[in-house]
Amino acid sequence: MLDFKISYDLGPVAAWFELDFCIDLIPKIEEAGFDVAWMGDHLIPWFHTHAHSPQAWVLLTIMAERTRKIPIGSDVTVPMFKYHPVIVAHAFGTMGRLYPGRVLLGVGSGEAINEAPFVDRWPRWKERAEMLIEAIELMRKFWTAEDYFDFEGKYFKIKGLYCYDKPKKPVPIYFSALGPKAAYLAGKHGDHLMTAGPLSHLRDVVFPRFEEGAKDAGKDTTKMEKVVYLDGGLGDIGKLVAKYRKTSASSLLPESFDERDPRKLEKIGSKVPDEVIKANACLFSSANEFIELISGLKNIGATHFILGDWGYDPEGTIKAFKEEVIPYLK
């Protein structure tokens, strides 16, 4: 049985605040008792005004340097389009050699806003999923091959490749999946599941399909994490709603799904009513509400919660988790 984990995602913070502030925040994440410090891997943010979008791998190495024991991970990197899978494997293999057992790799099939600028045609999900599975196979071979090797895939072809600085411990792959088909692939091809959505959908659809895929691959599901990422914030509800509307509310409307311009996404988000934001983002005025939320996740079988902190006071949120949420749930 896996111990339940509570983690913090620096990505939303780095999308709004200056880098110096984010770097100063890193040790506080570990001191608070969070299990993992994550960083979103984005080229383009989902909003324009006041936005930042630092390179994730640079931040990940700084996160590892500014902490002692806590694992660090991307949520998520897409090992195709803007990154070739070997480039991803090279970077995370190097981090895995420098920080053994502390490097986690979240992968996904990609969002058009970050990946489509690099290709002539944005593939449908089925094709992107096939590419992702092949990319995972290539990355694992790069990390483990004992000699030079060739790789002849449908999407990726490599001749004469070898990794000289292999990770000292395996880099676990967290497969991002929101729907039933992707969840099955996550169980079959990933080491762990990373997902999001309503609790009933996770319990009744995503988790069972993930376990089905894992069992079909002969894996022990009791050793595989079910990670749930949720947008959140702690403080004054009015301020939280206003900030979320500007930064991330466009993701709640279907017209945003194929939009690639953050200036237009920001305008789309401005139309989202308060009640829709409150119903879909975990914006709370008290730490007790986070305790109830995480307890509910545990009850449906989740084993790991990631807080995507879209609040206006990250230091206050981290302090509340340190003093109230984590001690109660651990």
Image: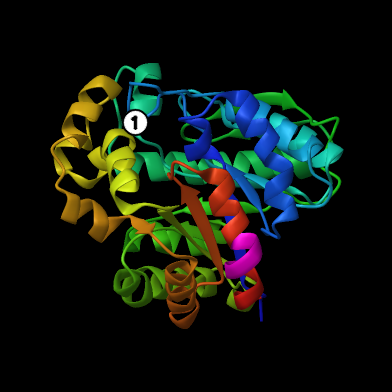
Residue 292: percent from the left, percent from the top?
A: 44, 75
Q: Residue at x 34, y 24 (%)?
A: 116
Looking at the rendering, the stretch of residues picked out in magenta corresponds to 321-325
Q: In which quarter of the image is residue 158?
A: top right
Residue under label 1, please give it. Answer: 46
Residue 279 painted magenta: no
Question: Where is the N terminus found, in terms of image quarters?
Answer: bottom right
Q: In this rendering, does residue 150 appear at all?
A: no
Q: In which quarter of the image is residue 142?
A: top right
Q: In this view, does 26 lie to the left or right of 202?
A: right
Q: Residue at x 59, y 73 (%)?
A: 218
Q: Is residue 44 above or below residue 197?
A: above
Q: In this rendering, does residue 19 appear at all?
A: yes
Way the structure is coloured:
rainbow
For label 1, the crowd category at 10 Å Cα-Cα, with few meaning under 14, some 14 to 19 and many 20 or more, is: many
Of 288 and 246, nearer the camera is 288
Residue 220: percent from the left, percent from the top?
A: 63, 76
Q: Is residue 225 left or right of residue 52?
A: right
Image label count: 1
Q: Which residue is drawn at 43% across and 77% down?
A: 296
Q: What residue type is labelled 1?
A: Trp
Residue 212: percent from the left, percent from the top?
A: 45, 74
Residue 324 painted magenta: yes
